[in-house]
Amino acid sequence: MKVAKEDGYWILTEPYYKGWAERHQVKTGDIILEVNGVKVDYLYDLKYEHVIRTARELTIKKTNGDIISLKVSLFDIPQQFYYVLIVPFCYFLLTLFITLYLYYKQKNTILINLLILFILTISLAYVSSGAASRLNTLGIIINRSSMLLCLAILMHFLKIYFEFISLNMNLKWLFIKKVNIFYIFPIISVLLSIFGILYPSTHFQNSYIILGLFFFLLLLILGIIIVGYFKYKTPQLKILLSSIIIPFLPFLFLYALPQILFNKQLMSADVCSLFLMLIPFSFIFTQLTERIFDMEYYISRLRYYFNFSFVFTLWLLLGLYFLTDLPLARLTEIFFFAFLSLMALFYIKERIDYGKRKILFSTKGDYIHHLYTTIDSIGRVVKIEDLLARFVQEVALQLEVENVTVLTYDFYTHRVTLNAQSQAYMQHIDETLLERLSLGDIHKTDYFYLAFIHQDAHSKRILVIDHRQSIYLKDEELLWLELLLLYVNNFIENTKMVEDLLQQLKHMKAAGNQELSWLNKLLWLRFEEEKYQLAQELHDTILQEQLHIAREMDALVHAKDIEGISSQLVKVHEQLVISLNDLRGYCESLKPPLLDTLGLNAALEKLVQKINKRADFLLIYTMDRLYLEDERLNLIIYRLFQELLNNALKHANADTVEVHLLSTEEGFEILYTDDGIGCNMDDLLRADSMGIRGMQERVQAFNGKFTLDTKVGEGVTIHIRVSEGHHTPSYTPHTLKRPLI
């Protein structure tokens, strides 16, 4: 409570906990006589700050002359009990659990270790704040030093974090390199706190000095992140900046500014300070998302949740404001509770929907299951006409309609190929509508549902569902039909390609052309070459190691010196473990496990780390995040990276190697350069290098461009470009850059 000295008495001017004061009839103007059995005049703290902080017993003289004694128990002020004891204790347990989890799951990484120290220091500062506010000596020292220590650790964390993300992006640390100098700040805090205890008159001046240091460090950290974000525009720094600024907003706009401008707070400082506790946990998100999550995706998700939750919560708050007489402070608390609850609800609902994505509930059943079974049924057909007949049959069965047919619209005659059923339909169908229909379109008319199936150079196929003005397809049914149409369109395209290929092979065979046997021979030789290379690799490495281990074991079996067997077995065991690790490496090379689990970028990151351990050159690389429709391209990109980096290890003899994976509007690009020994282009072509040839064939298989430029002593430059949806392979020749054919 705030007090002021008037006429030799200490008068109560403002109780901090007004609810407690009202319950005990303690009012402004009452005279405080004793605190904890000590006369007020002997409380040395009042000389420097007119605030009573640590009262367990009070003797008060009322304005009418009555003298009353009050005992302040722990539960008299519930909000203090929760905010000073229960919440900090729970927060400490939560941080302890999370830091132990991080420690055991992510060992030997300096970023994780700094993050653990940062979280524990924040927790320590929060737990000690209650004791410090009651002027407990140990609480003051711990609270002040941990406040500055957490920011010093955060500065250290940021420097290492910049270095970490600079592996993928060209980022530079924007401040002094020796950030360890900031660890002197908590030491200064401890010394000032001890000095304030020895000389109480300096206690509050020391508080202002420590707060000034805290403010200086905080502004410095924010400045580094803000300048870094506007300079490099990376989502990592955007998340980092948001994770610091957003938790400060409730404290700033709901407590600090209203208190300064209107001398009235919308929310108490105790509640607002809880938002600051989100800062360390947001850093966990920023650290782990580098390896596990698609950060841009989660930023967009949070923005999506925020917009919906904020608008609805604001609407709810306006309704409560006009329909009830709740105070503004309580409405603000309701707003935050409802807002955060809705954010959590949207997230949980999305996760549940994703888990149940194979189920769309309807009165007719599970449409997604029907889609799977229909696709499986249609996929077994090998002829287009049979495919369309099966498709019509499945649509009629699943939608429970009788009249379903396929019309063929000819572009040259602008007419529909008529049969008995389609002739009856044409008097109700607008031909211009048939021309406008495109992939994915489903159009409802007065008599029919018309849907696009497939189009080639001569004609367009249209699905007609006669609803006879009596049925209405639900959203689930339209979604099912739309997805099925996309699959059928792809089925027809693939079936036509297979039919064309079969026709070509039949003509070749009928004409006695030897290219058919040449094709079989080529495929057979390629398989044999791959098997030979794998066998040679295993023979030269794993097999030799296993033979050596077998000889060692044979020697041990016949050894007469029993005492030395144990130590020799340990060596054999180590050799066996090394051999198994090599074998695992070959398996990962043949089938990279991270590619299917964590995605392309994680698999490439591990590949680069493995190359870095073996390389004696500086490897500079960047990897854009790709969003490719054809998932097979992920494996192609991985194999290209693998071959490029292995060639750099074996043949380049370079000081610097650069490889960049770039996203384009239609696909991707890979740019590789090194400053190695290079080679003569003609020699390279004559050598028929399987590595280069393999890369060229992979790129050609997806209709991409593969260009290589090299000269003796001038290194190698390779440019690969693949665009999805391009069907004609092309190569771009250059005076110095010659495509490999």
Image (cartoon, rainbow, N blue to C red):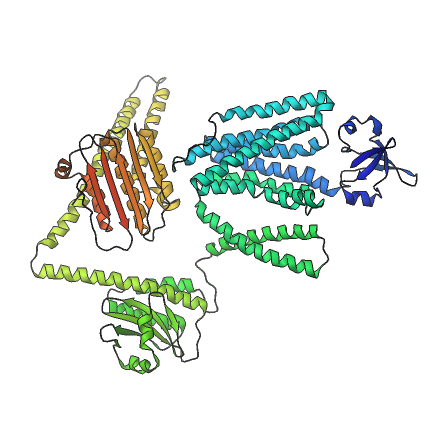
* Left or right of residue 229: residue 498: left
Instruction: Determine the residue positioned at 52% across, 55% down.
Output: 349
Please tell me whether residue 444 is drawn above or below residue 495 in the rendered image: below
**Rendering coords of residue 376 (x, y %):** 33, 62
Please tell me whether residue 154 is drawn above or below residue 192 in the rendered image: below
Q: In which quarter of the image is the C terminus?
A: top left
Residue 206 visible, this orientation: yes
* Left or right of residue 36: residue 299: left
Image quadrant assignment for residue 531 = top left
**Rendering coords of residue 460 (x, y %):** 27, 70
Image quadrant assignment for residue 725 = bottom left
Please tell me whether residue 369 is drawn above or below residue 155 in the rendered image: below
* Left or right of residue 104: residue 384: left
Image quadrant assignment for residue 273 = top right
* Left or right of residue 473: residue 537: left
Instruction: Determine the residue positioned at 74% across, 23% down.
Output: 201
Front residue of this view, candidates 119 and 305? 305
Please tell me whether residue 457 is drawn above or below residue 656 in the rendered image: below
Front residue of this view, candidates 82 and 187? 187
